[in-house]
Amino acid sequence: MILKLKRYEKNPILLPNGNRWENLNVSNAAAAVYDGKVYLLYRAEGEDMRTPEIKCPVTRLGLAVSENGFDIAERLDIPIFDRNTTDPWCEFGCEDPRISKIGDTYYIVYVTMSRFGYTGDRLAYATTKDFKTFTRHGLLMKQFEQRTSGFLPGKIGGRYFLFHRPMPNMWGSFSSDLVHWEDMSCILETKDGSWYENKLGIGAPPLETPYGWLLFWHGKDNSGKYSLGVMLLDRDDPRKIIKFQEEPILTPELDFERHGFVSNVVYTNGAVRFGDRYFIYYGCCDRCLAVGTLDVEEVAAWCREK
């Protein structure tokens, strides 16, 4: 059987609004279930440019809440994470968060934007227990320029596990203290002639199932098109792929998935199990946010299938 994402008929669920900091683009939302609701931390861009010379928008993180997984019931008017002009690593803002619950704490890995290096991307992380108070802990793996990263929602042998992407492939590393990293290895490589021939990485942090870790991921081909895929990772060693669907679960087809700030992009940062469905939130062309679902039983049947 082949899994295919079911689009919500009222997509997109989140659009730019009149707030100055998010009136250009909103996309790429992390997702977590808290207090019976789905909390979304999304990437937002507005009128502010990085510098008069660098005509790229400053990025910030906004917060929205859905009570049914589909429709937005609450949306804050101010960003929860803003640019920090006194922190050179976050001078141009922050973007593309991913949320993983470990114990009673939600860990948020996000990308800080700076003028250092070739791209200026660095990983950082923050924590919260209530989505009201957030503690920022600084950079992760300062030595790498990278993005597309998130924690496994649980520890393996007492150690944290981080999915990350030294270009262009998906890697994983362990740490006991979130400072020192070890046992780094490649999980998946690009494949010539495929929809993930150019680069790839995790989408949402994986979801725990009786069969292993369910991972929704993304790939980009050499035409610039981004698509979404699915795989199943070993419960005890998430570096091992135990089931892999070669065909994508979603490719850009609808107008808002094909045209926007960047063309032909569907990209997920967040997925949750909510009731009897998996909700996969995906940014469209870096312009707006949409959601698709898969039935839990359908995914279980796919996991069991030989």
Image: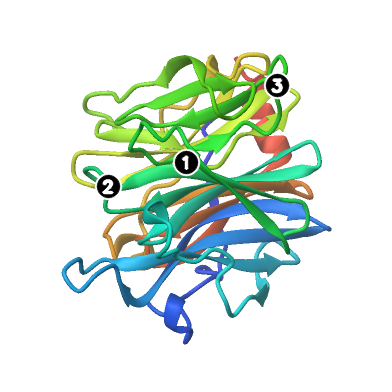
For the residues bearing labels 2 and 3, Cβ distance under 8 angstroms: no
Quick check: 279 left or right of 51?
right
Q: Is residue 118 left or right of residue 196?
A: left
Q: Which residue is mark 2?
A: 116
Residue 231 image point, x, y percent: 53, 27
Residue 296, by quadrant, is: top right
Q: Is residue 190 above or below residue 66?
A: above
Instruction: Tell me if residue 173 comes above or below residue 132 in the rendering.
Output: above
Q: Earlier in the sequence, mark 2 or mark 3?
A: 2
Residue 145 picture quarter: top left
Marks 1 and 2 in Cβ contact (< 8 Å): no
- Amino acid type, label 1: Ile
The C terminus - image quarter: top right
Dot label at residue 258: none
* Mark before the other along the chain sequence, 1 or 2: 2
Q: Position of residue 71 (x, y in %)?
A: 65, 70
Residue kind at label 3, given as amino acid type: Tyr
Amino acid carrying label 2: it is: Phe
Q: Which residue is mark 3?
A: 211
Q: Which image quarter is the N terminus in? A: top right
> Label 1, on which residue?
249
User: For the residues marked 2 and 3, what is the alpha-carbon distance in whole angstroms?
Assistant: 42 Å
Count of numbered labels shown in the rendering: 3
Q: Local crowd at mark 2 within 10 Å, few (<14), some, or many (≥20)?
A: few
Question: Residue at point 74% right, 52% down?
Answer: 33
Going 45% across and 63% down the picture, which residue do you hit? 84
Q: Nearer the viewer, residue 305 or 217?
A: 217
